[in-house]
Amino acid sequence: MSSIPIRVWAPNARSVGVVVEGNTLPLSAEPDGWWVHSPGLPAGTDYAFMLDGDGPYPDPRSAHQPHGVHGPSRTFDPTQHAWQDADWPGIDVRGAVIYELHVGTFTPEGTLDSAIERLDHLADTGVDIIELMPVAAFPGTRGWGYDGVALYAVHDTYGGPAALQRFVDAAHARGLGVALDVVDNHLGPTGNYLALFGPYFTDAHHTPWGSAVNLDQPGSEHVRSFLIDKAVRWFRDFHLDALRLDAVHELRDDSPTHVLAQLASTTAALAAELGRPLGLIAESDLNDVTMVTPVSEGGLGMTAQWDDDVHHAIHAFLTGERHGYYTDFGSLETLVAALQQVFVHNGTYSSFRHKVWGAPVPDTVDRRHFVIATSTHDQVGNRGLGDRPPERLTAGQSAIAAALLLTTPFTPMLFMGEEWASRTPFQFFTDFDDPDLAQAVREGRAREFGEHGWDEIYGPGAEAPDPQAATTFERSRLDWDEHTRPEHARHLAWVKALIALRRLRPDLRGGDATSLRVSADPTAGWLILHREHTDVVINTAAHTQQVTLPEPGPRVVLASWEPRDHGVDDGAIDLAAHDVVILGRD
């Protein structure tokens, strides 16, 4: 049986021991605050650390927490999996169709193994990359994963680390890449023992969660290695294709080389070694192209970044919502600006932030560096009732949203179930066992419900769902029977058709800024996305109308939402209410 090395960084400890089967074995001190147990422990062994006689505490680099985040860790040998993906060439996230899913609610069973059974559906839909919401071990059995505390581990309820390897292998066998959402900017409020081991956090900077992760103060070189080594491990031992990095603007780092640039350089070197692309997708609120500028050019080197401005522009325009951060969005002119300029706030005043925000994106920057969405876990789950856009949109408006998502030069991302216009809510749910923390979360969610004005959206008497209630979690499970019902099946066929066209026509995949021109009439409510050889003609009005095509020439209907005679000629086209027609000009 293989032996797993046991090493831990505990620079302030005078003695460190490892507890195995009730016995405490001493560790030997190494330079720079490291401690080691030689010759290690067999795979599958439960163990925990004692620090100066206190403990036991789980391993900061634990691969598996089968007894919960407060219990002992379990050794895991990643080499025991017999990989079948030797021929997998890898996949570039830029321009790929990404699909975000939450393991716990994606299937009735809520496991990685049960998710494998749905991979054929994703491949048939045309998905390129699956983006898993965080799987790092978190308190309880149900949660979004953004309160993880064992950042190297795979949540036991989902199947543990071996299940993640099986999932990635099965995805690659179907031509699907896998990205993993990782949270490096904070740890959850319970089960976080890192500060007992060393200076993992610092009061030199603060974040919405409290003290910042220590990236630039004494001891930070080891904290940075903790994060970099973790990324390398996901790529090397679990064959992941990309990482989605949560809220990178909260990685407070004033060192000469930002930790993201260090991660980008390390990832690029590893990609060259492995012979396949490895991607880094940043969630950033900064609206700054520096995020995706190469490190060699003074940037942070991310492969792509989320672009919430496009989401806000589409959502506010189609739904009419104007509260909160939708205040500066909603007009057709703003939607056109988002599609053509990447960011709406690109050096302009943000009334939500009460300051000038962002910077322009040069036309020389490939638009595939920007991941756009019409639904995400954030934009759905952080709504008062976790309701999805189809609850408020007509079927035609949902079809318009899909067309805007899948025919623009950006990298599109679907949220699980969106491919069939699911109406299953995705609500905020937790499972904290600390009664005081659980009550604080309930009260905080209820308070936010009122502060954000959700009662104005949902009407009098609406209340925030109890995040601690098991029923809140159960309501958020996808209803897989939905996609067979006529209205949902129609939308699924539409999404499949759009993705198929995207694959068939290179101009729909291109990310050149000049590959998109937009014509629009805000009064009439129509817009046309002009790609090189394709026109996407959209009628957002609730009535039929004829749209004059700016450029003459023969065209053929490639796809349409409404099955009708659109009367295409050299100069105009007839559209039904809330209709989309895609025309080919070659």
Image: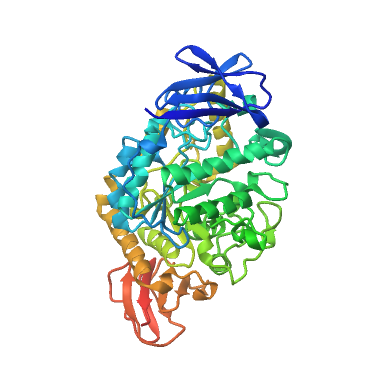
Q: Is residue 452 above or below residue 156?
A: below
User: To which quarter of the image does residue 87 belong?
Assistant: bottom left
Report whether 376 appears left or right of 255: left
- Residue 104 lies, with reference to residue 129, above or below; the image says above
> Residue drawn 63% across and 18% down?
15
Percent x, y of residue 215: 67, 41
Q: Residue at x 44, y 64 (%)?
A: 404
Question: Is residue 365 among the parts visible in the rendering?
Answer: yes
**Residue found at the very far top of the displayed protein:** 22
Q: Residue at x 55, y 45 (%)?
A: 246
Is residue 117 rendered to the left or right of residue 473?
left
| Quarter of the figure with the C terminus | bottom left
Q: Quadrant of the N terminus?
A: top left
* Residue 494 spot, x, y in % from top left: 32, 62
| Quadrant in the rendering for residue 584 | bottom left
Q: Position of residue 520 (x, y in %)?
A: 51, 74
Residue nearer the viewer, 272 or 396: 272
- Position above or below: 195 against 562: above
- List x then y, in percent, for residue 294: 61, 61
- Between 14 and 522, the residue placed more toward the observer is 14
188 is higher (above) or lower (below) than 97: above
> Residue farthest to the right?
204
